[in-house]
Amino acid sequence: MTKPDPIPARLTALKTTSTPDLKQQWRELFDSEPPPFNRRYLESRLAYRIQELVYGGLKPDTVKRLEALGEQLDGGDRNKSRIRADRDRPITGTRLLREWQGTEQIVTVTADGFEWQGRPYKSLSAIARAITGTRWNGWVFFGLKNHRRST
């Protein structure tokens, strides 16, 4: 008779593990300090790492394929992907309007991000989350989803 796999139970236990204990597991599994991200991020990365260590990570062919796709997108140059993002960004000074639950929300595009209710933000998603209390793609929330056709 085969022993039951303990990994599913270990993954389930992450949901009820205290945050300090999650951070300790991070230190043990990644041999580094945990990042200052939310609990859900820690849980998901720990779950992946536990499975990776027990069952193995991505196959070398998969890693090569992902690297090749990344090269196709930006040639491995992070600045190119930033330039592409900047190209699609509204012009500084543009005001974005969105009505949410009967209240008009106004966001101003600034040189280094966005401003909402007098506070600076780096992303529209952060503003959309502040407004709604849930995760949103900020570009979609404010109606800026890119509809251009690729040529």
Image (cartoon, rainbow, N blue to C red):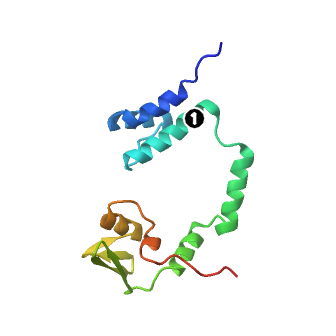
Q: Which residue is mark 1?
A: 51
Residue 2 placed where, x, y %?
A: 64, 16
Depicted 132 relative to depicted 47: above or below: below
Residue 5, above or below 131: above
Picture quadrant of residue 52: top right
Task: Name the outermost residue toward the front.
Answer: 102
Position of residue 2 relative to residue 28, above or below, is above
Under mark 1, the amino acid is Gln
SS under mark 1 = helix
Q: Quadrant of the C terminus?
A: bottom right
Q: Nearer the viewer, residue 87 or 139?
A: 139
Count of labels shown? 1
**Residue 101: x percent and y percent?**
30, 71
Q: Please state if 143 lies on the left or on the right of 132 as rendered.
A: right
- In the picture, measured across the screen, residue 123 lies left or right of residue 8, that is left
In this rendering, would 144 be left or right of 21? right
